[in-house]
């Protein structure tokens, strides 16, 4: 019994199950993967989104002319 014969007639049900799973995956692969991702996200949510810090820009200095007529010789 330890070394029993494993013939094709005993392996056909296993091959049929593997072929059925592969066929379902090929037909609905994208939705199955999406369902799995959503399930994992609900069970084990990742870190919450933290927006990056905002960098405050200094106010622009008032435009001063480089040369005025009053300073002209």
Image (cartoon, rainbow, N blue to C red):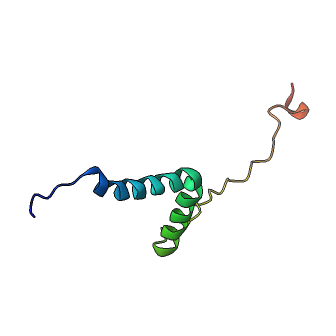
Place of residue 11 in the rendered image (x, y in percent of width and height, measured from the top left): 30, 54
Q: Quick check: 8 above or below 42? A: above
> Which residue: 53% across, 56% down?
24
- Please tell me which residue is depicted at 10% across the width and 57% down the height of the picture: 3
In x, y percent, where is residue 17? 41, 59
Q: Residue furthest left?
A: 2
Is 2 displayed left or right of 57 in the figure? Answer: left
Nearer-the-camera pick, 27 or 58: 27
- For the C terminus, give its image quadrant: top right
Residue 32 is situated, as x and y percent measured from the top left of the image, at 55, 60
Q: Residue furthest bottom?
A: 43
Horizontal side of 26 relative to 12 (left or right) equals right
Left or right of 3: which side holds 34?
right
Residue farthest top in this picture: 73
Q: Between 7 and 15, which is closer to the camera in this rendering?
A: 7
Q: Is residue 47 visible?
A: no
**Number of numbered tags placed on the structure image:** 0
**Quadrant in the picture for residue 28:** bottom right
Q: Give the residue at x 41% y 55%.
A: 16
Q: Residue at x 45, y 72 (%)?
A: 44
The N terminus - image quarter:
bottom left
Of residues 62 and 11, the one nearer the viewer is 11
The front one of 30 and 66 is 30
Asked whether the viewer can see residue 31, the reply is: yes
Q: In the displayed orientation, state which residue is furthest to the right.
A: 69
């Amino acid at each position: 019994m330890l070394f029993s014969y494993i013939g094709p007639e005993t392996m056909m049900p296993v091959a049929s199950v593997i072929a059925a799973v592969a066929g379902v995956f090929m037909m609905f692969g994208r939705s199955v993967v999406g369902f799995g991702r959503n399930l994992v996200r609900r069970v084990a949510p990742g870190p919450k989104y933290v927006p990056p810090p905002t960098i405050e820009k200094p106010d622009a200095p008032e435009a001063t002319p480089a040369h005025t007529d009053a300073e002209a010789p």
